[in-house]
Amino acid sequence: MKRFLFLLLFPVILSAQSTIEATSDTKWLTNYDKAIKKSKKEDKNVLIYFTGSDWCPPCKMLKSDLFETSEFKTLADNYILLYIDMPRNQDLLSKEQYSHNKSLLPKLNKKGVFPLLKIIDSKGDVLDEYSGYAMNGEVKYHLDLLKNNL
């Protein structure tokens, strides 16, 4: 009976898994210099996402409310994506990655705001930004930021 139930539910499980993968398959870089280089090569702006993945509730909510949506995925194709995580548990990143991320704060996130979306051009000049998230499911302003800087 258990095998029958498993065989019956297996296609449902597979389809759910592929749906999850389809909405979260955006490719985030974690190195600023590589993002700038790719930005120049592909003639795209860079979307930088500053997050505190293990301590920032709005950052965690923004992940599901914005980054895992099909609308974000569509817009993200027009950007080079750069993920800058500043977790409190430094064991979540390599020492090199943590140091790299921390070095970007004085230049690109002087106030230490999380979450922060910042758009820069291929020269590293800031074009626009939007900080914070009310955790109410309303991501219109985040999406408008992306649409307005294509």
Image (cartoon, rainbow, N blue to C red):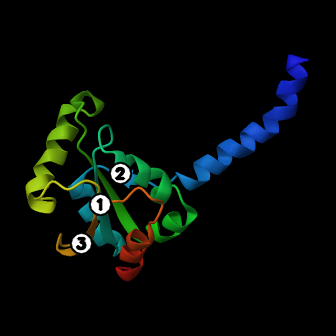
Residue 136 vertical placement versus 102 (above, below): below
* Pointers 1 and 3 in contact (C-beta within 8 Å): no
Q: Circle 2 sits on which residue?
A: 58
Horizontal and vertical percent for residue 24?
Answer: 52, 51
Image mark count: 3
Residue shown at 36% from the left, 75% from the top: 145
- Residue type, label 3: Ser
Q: Nearer the viewer, residue 65 or 30?
A: 65
- Give the position of the C terminus as an image quadrant: bottom left
Q: Residues within 10 Å of mark 2 (few under 14, many from 20)?
A: some
Task: Quote the CA–CA distance across marks 3 and 2.
Answer: 28 Å
* Pointers 1 and 2 in contact (C-beta within 8 Å): yes
Q: Residues within 10 Å of mark 3 (few under 14, many from 20)?
A: some
- Image side of residue 73 versus residue 10, left or right: left
Residue shown at 25% from the left, 53% from the top: 114
Specify which label sits upstream in the sequence, 3 or 2: 2
- Residue type, label 1: Gly
